[in-house]
Image (cartoon, rainbow, N blue to C red):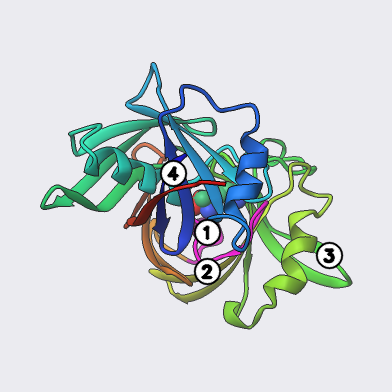
Amino acid sequence: MDFVKMHGLGNDFIILYGEQELPQDAAEQAIRLCDRHFGIGADGLVYLLPSDKADARMRIINSDGSEPEQCGNAIRCAAKYLFDRGIVPRTSLTIETIGAGVQPVDIREVNGRAVAIRVDMGRPILQADQIPTTLEGESVIDQELTVNGETFRFTAVSMGNPHCVIFTEEAKHISLAEWGPALERHPLFPNKTNVEFVSVRSPEHLVMRVWERGAGPTLACGTGACATLVAAVLNGHSPRVATVSLAGGDLQIEWKEEDGHVYMTGPSIEVFQGQFTE
Ligand code: ZDP
């Protein structure tokens, strides 16, 4: 089985191209291939499939076998894969995902290689029951939740997938291993949630650490960065454009007033190709 290994800011993926549909055993494949000791190692397994609405369709399986609706870093990797290989020889292309439908992508290229990728991540979902949370109302901004005896203030945002954004003085001092799993499975979030701890360095500069649903602590999360900027705007911390610094590097995020869409710009890197032989 041929594969390509890519990452977006250290959030790494195995890309499989050539299948017509998601195979029946995709969840087992993801668990096996994403394993860092017994497999190739990755945060997620990405299938690039044909689409009748877009240039390609992407489905991603987390390293635990669960399937998220959406994935910001992986969509930049998918775009680079399609462009660099000449499968889609255009700097403007579209990729279909479950969570956001057909997503327009713009590529900045140098010598035929995609170096920066801007993705239209669509409109954030703010309504409490659609995120989903067990709360009611038009939005979930600066609410309280308690886990293991500790109270956090959080803002919930869906970018297709659910995010629980917690603003804190020093995100880097938070123990992700201690709080991540409990927040991911908190009963307020019926589909579980991704968890972001965010420090506001300045209105245009947010520092974020993430515990990902189904994958644990990762070096970056594109949808998480988008949810973070939206939450920062909703809480009055940021204007509609900011840099979000993640452990693996920076993303530029803009929540456009005109169309209400969130735009994410960042790199993706191809590391190696190989053949899985087991
Ligand atoms: O929602 C989830 O279950 C996430 N783990 C999906 C992966 C999100 C990703 N890290 C991103 O960049 O948006 C790929």
Nearer to us of marks 4 and 3 is: 4
Would residue 278 be seen by someone viewing this image from the given angle? Answer: yes
> Looking at the image, is 119 positioned above or below residue 48?
below
> Element at badge 1?
helix
Circle on res. 228: 1
| Residue behind mark 4 | 15
> Element at badge 4?
strand
Left or right side of 102 for 61: right
Circle on res. 208: 2
Q: Position of residue 243 (x, y in %)?
A: 37, 65
> Element at badge 3?
strand
**Disc 1: residue Cβ within 8 A of ligand 1's nearest atom:** no
Left or right side of 190 for 245: left
Q: Are marks 3 and 2 in contact (CB under 8 Å)?
A: no
The structure residue drawn at horizontal position 74% and vertical position 48%, both measured from the top left corner, is 192
Q: CA distance from mark 4 to mark 2?
A: 26 Å
The structure residue drawn at horizontal position 32% and vertical position 31%, both measured from the top left corner, is 94
Q: CA distance from mark 3 to mark 2?
A: 21 Å
| Residue behind mark 3 | 146
In the image, farthest residue toward the right: 149
Q: Are marks 3 and 1 in contact (CB under 8 Å)?
A: no
What kind of residue is marked 2?
A: Met
The structure residue drawn at horizontal position 23% and vertical position 45%, both measured from the top left corner, is 107
